[in-house]
Image: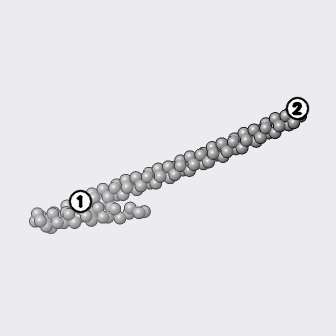
Amino acid sequence: MKYRFIPAFVMLLAGLVCCIMSIVQGWPVTYSLVVLVIVLILFYIIGQIAAQVVGKVVAEHEAMVKAEQERREAEEEARRLEEAALKAAEELRAKEEKAEAEQQDQEMDSDW
């Protein structure tokens, strides 16, 4: 999993802030350790939630990009098919016009 270090990073950063605060405030060691354990557990859980959210958002984004790419490919295929149909229709019309012109030429030749 790409996001497995997020909980540890969040937890350790919160622990660092807690340790600095306990030193600056001059808290007793036992009180500081209890607060530190609570902070580490709490922020580990928060980090887990954050990693899940980030993973879900990235997965949704990748799915959306894939769906958009498939839609574009489908539109491109439809456009190519439409162009091929138009080209075939033009060729058919040209053949019909040529056949009609030949028929008229034959009628004119038979009239003479």
Based on the displayed image, in which of its 4 quarters is residue 43 positioned?
bottom left
Question: Disc number at residue 111?
Answer: 2
Secondary element type, mark 2 = helix
What amino acid is labelled 1 in the image? Answer: Ile
Q: Which of 65 and 102 is in front in this view?
A: 102
Secondary element type, mark 1 = helix
Residue 73 is situated, as x and y percent measured from the top left of the image, at 56, 50
Residue 95 is situated, as x and y percent measured from the top left of the image, at 76, 42
State which quarter of the image contains the N terminus: bottom left
Q: Name the residue under label 1.
A: 38
What amino acid is labelled 2 in the image? Answer: Asp
The reply, left or right, for residue 48 in relation to residue 78 is: left
Q: Which of 37 and 15 is in front in this view?
A: 15
Residue occupying the point 77% across, 40% down: 98
The reply, left or right, for residue 106 in relation to residue 69 is: right
State which quarter of the image contains the C terminus: top right
The reply, left or right, for residue 75 in relation to residue 100 is: left
Residue occupying the point 44% across, 54% down: 59
- Name the residue furthest front: 112
Residue occupying the point 79% across, 36% down: 100
